[in-house]
Image (cartoon, grey):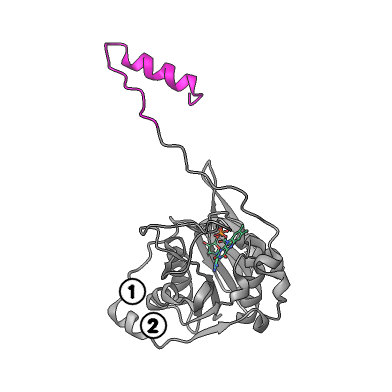
């Protein structure tokens, strides 16, 4: 059965470039070029593999980003996704996690998905809350931390990573699944893919196109506030243990002290 697989794709400031916070709002400066979050390249790859198994299936990307940014979407389109929906609107500035989920849920609903894939957490915000909020808003089952995903077009079969190993979880489609970085190896876009991506459709929507009220999103709708940001503590140098014949005992004593053994 042909499937429409939707992938949530976050476009983020390049983690390799210097970043800055807005001094007033303490939010990340996202004004420059944004790239495909590496976490989402796994979701895109997973979607392409699942869609590739069933003729007629397609992958649709959904993203919310400022300034009409499509650079990260073009990368995912070059990997092989068919189309993208971008939500971009000045009124979205200041959107917290729940407002972002409301926007993404409304955009995903329009795409009429059989399956929604997202990463377990993004690289820049890493709250890990978005996908389950989207599932709740859409009234869909959600399965998180997938290390493998299989579907027959009606049901979803997931190996869900746990601390001890994995659980086997099944649920009916449509559903939302979050994938870990171990799920698949993302492909590199080919030259042909990069050229083809330039002409693939990207539908850009505003908040009102989605039927949402501007008071539900952005600073107006935010229920979270960033009250303080501080530097992470510098890592102190570790203790050097010189083995004088009692090295093993001293290591075991240290591990017992920190309750590792
Ligand atoms: C008070 C406040 C103000 C903020 N203001 C802004 C702002 O002005 N501009 C801004 O960009 N951010 C802003 N943020 C951050 C923004 O709320 C989060 O980045 C957003 O909610 C996603 O959270 P996350 O990255 O932790 O998602 P996670 O739950 O860690 O993400 C998991 C997965 O969900 C999907 N996903 C997450 N976000 C998106 C997205 N935008 N598009 C598509 N898929 C997505 C991806 O697959 C991602 O890997 C603000 C946050 C707060 C608290």
Is there any visible trace of residue 232 in the rendered image? yes
Residue 47 location (% of width, % of height): 48, 71
* Secondary structure state at the residue bearing disc 1: loop
Residue positioned most to the top: 245
Q: Is residue 174 left or right of residue 55?
A: right
Residues in magenta?
Answer: 236-261
Residue at x-position 73% and y-position 72%:
215
Is there any visible trace of residue 140 in the rendered image? no
Q: Quadrant of ligand 1?
A: bottom right
Q: Nearer the viewer, residue 190 or 19?
A: 19
Residue at x-position 48% and y-position 66%:
30
How many labels sit on residues? Answer: 2
Q: Is residue 144 left or right of residue 81?
A: right
Q: Which residue is mark 1?
A: 189
Q: Which residue is mark 2?
A: 197
Give the vertical position of 94 relative to 244 (above or below).
Answer: below
Q: Residues within 10 Å of mark 2 (few under 14, many from 20)?
A: many
Quadrant hosting residue 35: bottom left
Q: Is residue 183 left or right of residue 175?
A: left
Answer yes or no: disc 2 within 8 Å of ligand 1: no
- Residue 246 part of the magenta segment: yes
Residue at x-position 56% and y-position 77%:
88
Task: Tell me if label 2 and label 1 are in contact, CB under 8 Å.
Answer: yes
* Secondary structure state at the residue bearing disc 2: helix
Residue at x-position 42% and y-position 57%:
19
Residue 99 location (% of width, % of height): 66, 66
- Residue 97 part of the magenta segment: no
Q: Is residue 26 left or right of residue 237?
A: right
Compare marks 2 and 1 and give the one earlier in the sequence.
Answer: 1
Give the vertical position of 138 relative to 245 (above or below).
Answer: below
């Amino acid at each position: 059965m042909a499937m429409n697989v939707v992938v949530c794709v976050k476009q983020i400031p390049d983690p390799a470039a210097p970043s800055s916070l807005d001094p007033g709002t303490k939010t990340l400066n996202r004004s420059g070029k944004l790239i495909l979050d590496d976490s989402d390249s796994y979701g895109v790859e997973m979607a392409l593999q699942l869609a590739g198994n069933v003729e007629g299936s397609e992958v649709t990307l959904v993203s919310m980003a400022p300034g009409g940014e499509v650079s990260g979407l073009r990368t995912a389109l070059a990997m092989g996704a068919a189309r993208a929906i971008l939500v971009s609107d000045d009124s979205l500035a200041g959107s917290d996690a729940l407002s972002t989920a409301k926007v993404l849920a409304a955009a995903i609903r329009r795409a009429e998905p059989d399956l929604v894939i997202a990463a377990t957490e993004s690289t820049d915000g890493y709250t890990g809350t978005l996908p389950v909020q989207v599932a709740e808003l859409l009234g869909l089952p959600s399965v998180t931390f997938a290390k493998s995903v299989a579907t027959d077009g009606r049901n979803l079969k997931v190996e869900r990573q746990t601390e001890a190993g994995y659980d086997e979880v099944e649920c009916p489609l449509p559903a939302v699944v979050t994938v870990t970085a171990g799920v698949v190896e993302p492909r590199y876009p080919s030259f042909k893919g990069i050229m083809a991506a330039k002409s693939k459709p990207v539908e850009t929507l505003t908040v009102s196109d989605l039927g949402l009220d501007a008071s539900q999103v952005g600073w107006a709708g935010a229920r979270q506030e960033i009250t303080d940001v501080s530097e992470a503590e510098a890592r102190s140098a570790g203790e050097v243990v010189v083995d004088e014949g009692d090295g093993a005992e001293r290591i075991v004593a240290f591990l017992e002290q920190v309750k590792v053994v």
